[in-house]
């Protein structure tokens, strides 16, 4: 039999004499590798034991034939005594080895039977596991359908909750608006009370207004007089500025004439100095 890895965590082997395929699953790839190595060791050990047993049986048969031939010769020749003793001891050793080999073969047959029984149990467990897998698949399908139905129900409930939240938000906004309107109403009522109080002092305010109007008319007349005076002063200022500009022009002309006279006087003085130097 040969153990074959069919996946990372599953292996199988076939028994051609029993026409049966055995499979075994593992929790990890390391365990699968260890099992495959141990399977190969057991297989190799069984083969070696079978070969040794066969060799010992053949050797024992050959020695038995040789012993019978030598026994006949010993009867004919009395000088072969030591050789017979050696052959008997060798024959005894072979019998012991044959007995041990038979015991080993028996032990391997028992272990083989145990392995077959274990494989049968594993096969049954695998079939039960396959049935359980099918059952779990059906249950998984049912659970998945139930989950989808619950998800749809949850979506519907969430949508309803969203609508409820929107209604609550609208109600909250309406409450805030009502509170704002009530506050404005109270403010208007306060303003109305103030206006009523003010209406009681309107006659007094009217008299004061008339008094202020008279004072305003007097102030306007005074203001008009002041404006007239200001316009008169502006006219005087403009005339004064005009006279100042005129005086500046005349003064400039006078200065220019004075500069000419001073230049003539300097020329005259230089001429007098020159005449005095000549005399």
Image (cartoon, helix red, strand yellow):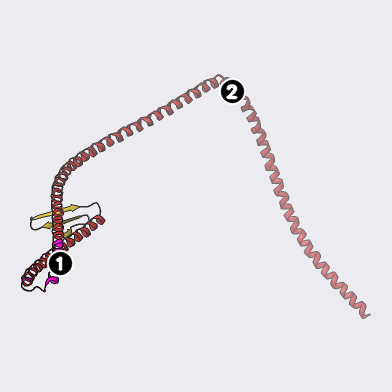
Give the magenta range: 74-97
| Quadrant placement of the C terminus | bottom right
Q: Quick one: SS at disc 1? A: helix
Q: Position of residue 176 (x, y in %)?
A: 41, 30
Magenta segment: does it hold 81?
Answer: yes
What label sits on residue 205 in the rendered view?
A: 2
> Measuring 10% from the left and 67% from the top, which residue is drawn there?
58
Please say if the residues under marks 1 and 2 sit with CB atoms less than 8 Å apart: no
Q: Is residue 11 left or right of residue 272?
A: left
Q: CA distance from mark 1 to mark 2?
A: 155 Å
Residue ID for mark 1:
90
Nearest to the observer: residue 70 or residue 48:
70
245 versus 58 height, above or below: above
Q: Is residue 63 left or right of residue 253?
A: left
Quadrant of the image occupied by residue 159: top left
Magenta segment: does it hold 197?
Answer: no
What label sits on residue 122 in the rendered view?
A: none
Q: Is residue 66 left or right of residue 240?
A: left
Residue 1 in sight in this render: no
Q: Position of residue 83 (x, y in %)?
A: 13, 71
Q: Position of residue 184 (x, y in %)?
A: 45, 27
Quadrant of the image occupied by residue 39: bottom left
Magenta stretch: helix, strand or loop mostly: helix
Quadrant of the image occupied by residue 90: bottom left
Residue 193 in sight in this render: yes
* Structural crowding at the residue carrying mark 2, measured as other residues with C-alpha within 10 Å and reported as few (<14), some (14–19) or many (≥20): few
> Measuring 89% from the left and 77% from the top, which residue is drawn there?
274
Q: Quick one: SS at disc 2? A: helix
Q: Position of residue 12 (x, y in %)?
A: 16, 56
Q: In the rendered structure, which disc, 1 or 2, sits on the residue that comes first in sequence?
A: 1
* Residue that lies at the very extreme toward the right in this rendered image: 279
């Amino acid at each position: 039999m040969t153990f074959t890895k069919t996946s990372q965590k599953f292996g199988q082997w076939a028994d051609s004499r029993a026409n049966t395929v055995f499979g075994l699953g593992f929790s990890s790839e390391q365990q699968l590798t260890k099992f495959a190595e141990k399977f190969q060791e057991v297989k190799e050990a069984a083969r070696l034991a079978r070969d040794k047993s066969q060799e010992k049986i053949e050797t024992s048969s050959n020695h038995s034939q040789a012993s019978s031939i030598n026994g006949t010769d010993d009867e004919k020749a009395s000088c072969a005594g030591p050789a017979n003793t050696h052959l008997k001891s060798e024959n005894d050793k072979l019998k012991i080895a044959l007995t041990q080999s038979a015991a080993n073969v028996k032990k391997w047959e028992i272990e083989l039977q145990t392995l077959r029984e274990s494989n049968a149990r594993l096969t049954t467990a695998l079939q039960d596991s396959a049935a359980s897998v099918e059952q779990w698949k059906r249950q998984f399908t049912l659970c998945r359908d139930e989950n989808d139905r619950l998800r749809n129900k949850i979506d519907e409930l969430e949508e309803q909750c969203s609508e409820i939240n929107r209604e609550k938000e609208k109600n909250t906004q309406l409450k805030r608006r009502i509170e704002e309107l009530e506050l404005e109403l109270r403010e208007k009522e306060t303003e109305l009370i103030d206006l009523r109080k003010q209406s009681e002092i309107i006659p007094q305010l009217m008299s004061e207004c008339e008094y202020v109007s008279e004072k305003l008319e007097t102030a306007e007349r005074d203001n008009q007089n002041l404006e007239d005076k200001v316009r008169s002063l502006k006219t005087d200022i403009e005339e004064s500025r005009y006279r100042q500009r005129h005086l500046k022009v005349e003064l400039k002309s006078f200065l220019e004439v004075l500069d000419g006279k001073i230049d003539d006087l300097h020329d005259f003085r230089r001429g007098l100095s020159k005449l005095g130097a000549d005399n």
